[in-house]
Image: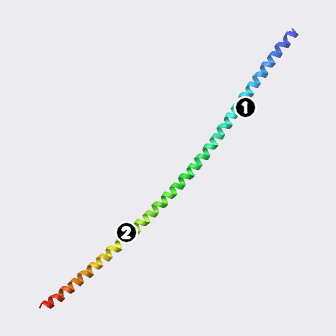
Amino acid sequence: MVEARGPACKLQAESANQAAKKYQEENLLLKQALLDEETAKTASKQLLRKEAEKLMEELKTAEDAVRKSNAEVEAMKRQANGLTKEYDRLLTKHNELQNLQGGTEDKKEQ
């Protein structure tokens, strides 16, 4: 009976050893999968961070362009206002000169 136990124990030990190796391999595969997943997440985070930085730069550029355009619009408004005032001044001066010329012509006719 002792002899019968020996091979059975040996077989049981080999089976347990194989199961342990199998679990170790599965454990290593799971660890590698987790490591790969973490690496992928890190790479994804870096890509997202770069994309966010790029978008922030584009936003800053667009905001600067809007500010510049607004400043140009205000400058054009001031220029148009100045031209309107100058036009009104010249029109008034023109009318005054026409009135003066009309008055001298009336005196000549008399």
Report the amino acid beneath label 2. Answer: Lys
Q: Which mark is residue 108?
A: none
**Seen from this angle, which residue lies furthest right?**
2
- Locate residue 38: give its quadrant: top right
**Seen from this angle, which residue lies furthest top?**
1
- Locate residue 100: give its quadrant: bottom left
When the figure is inspected, residue 20 is found, relative to residue 94, above or below; the finding is above
Q: Which residue is mark 1?
A: 28
- Locate residue 18: give its quadrant: top right
Judged left or right of residue 86, residue 43 is right
Judged left or right of residue 88, residue 66 is right
Report crowding for label 1: few under 14, some 14 to 19, many 20 or more residues within 10 A (C-alpha): few
Report crowding for label 2: few under 14, some 14 to 19, many 20 or more residues within 10 A (C-alpha): few
* Residue displayed at 63% across by 43% down: 43
Residue 100 vs residue 2, the one in the foreground: 100
Report the amino acid beneath label 1. Answer: Leu
* Residue displayed at 66% across by 37% down: 36
Residue 103 vs residue 49, the one in the foreground: 103
- x, y (%) of residue 49? 59, 49
* Residue displayed at 60% across by 43% down: 44
When the figure is inspected, residue 56 is found, relative to residue 19, above or below; the finding is below
Which quadrant: the C terminus? bottom left
When the figure is inspected, residue 94 is found, relative to residue 76, above or below; the finding is below
Judged left or right of residue 99, residue 51 is right
- x, y (%) of residue 34? 67, 35
Q: Which residue is mark 2?
A: 77
